Amino acid sequence: MKLFSTAVAATLAAAALMTATPAQADSTSDVFVSTLQRYGIDGIDPATAVRIGEQVCPMLAEPGQNVADVAADVADALGRPLGPATMFTGLAIQFFCPRAVTALTDGRPFSFFG
């Protein structure tokens, strides 16, 4: 009887493993899009949101650029008012170029190269 119970338990465990959806960690892009939605910045195609979000870091690294300039460019690209675009820009910086946060809080210009 014990052998039968062990065999049944093993079969059930194997069936559960075969039917389980593999666990996958959210990519940065997925988390970025869900965070935008959580903060009420929705109605943007996810692929567009990621594309524009990923462009924030290179724009910020351009000489003479600052967050306000980048946010204005994001507002134009998204067709959104400056307020939501500024929040979008801040979130994009946090997700796609977190080193920029340190540089900006230290008052240094952001650079991809150091």
Image (cartoon, grey):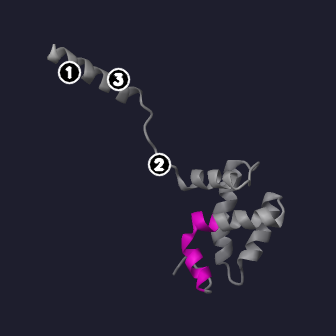
In space, the residues marked 2 and 1 are separated at their CA atoms by 33 Å
Instruction: Write down the residue under mark 2.
Output: 25
Is residue 99 one of those drawn in magenta?
yes
Q: Nearer the viewer, mark 3 or mark 1?
A: 1
Q: Secondary structure at mark 3?
A: helix
Q: Earlier in the sequence, mark 2 or mark 1?
A: 1
Q: Which quarter of the picture shows residue 80? A: bottom right
Residue lying at 63% horizontally and 62% vertically, measured from the top left: 54
The amino acid pointed to by label 1 is: Thr
Q: Earlier in the sequence, mark 3 or mark 1?
A: 1
Q: Secondary structure at mark 1?
A: helix
Q: Which quarter of the picture shows residue 72? A: bottom right
Residue lying at 71% horizontally and 62% vertically, measured from the top left: 88
Is residue 75 one of those drawn in magenta?
no
User: What is the magenta range?
Assistant: 92-106
The amino acid pointed to by label 3 is: Ala
Residue 29 horizontal/vertical position (percent)? 59, 54
Instruction: Write down the residue under mark 3.
Output: 15
The amino acid pointed to by label 2 is: Ala
Instruction: Write down the residue under mark 1.
Output: 6
Question: Does residue 39 sit above or below 5 in this rendering?
Answer: below
Residue 112 horizontal/vertical position (percent)? 56, 76
Residue lying at 70% horizontally and 60% vertically, measured from the top left: 52
Q: Nearer the viewer, residue 81 or 40?
A: 40
Confirm or deny contact between disc 3 and disc 1 (CB under 8 A).
no
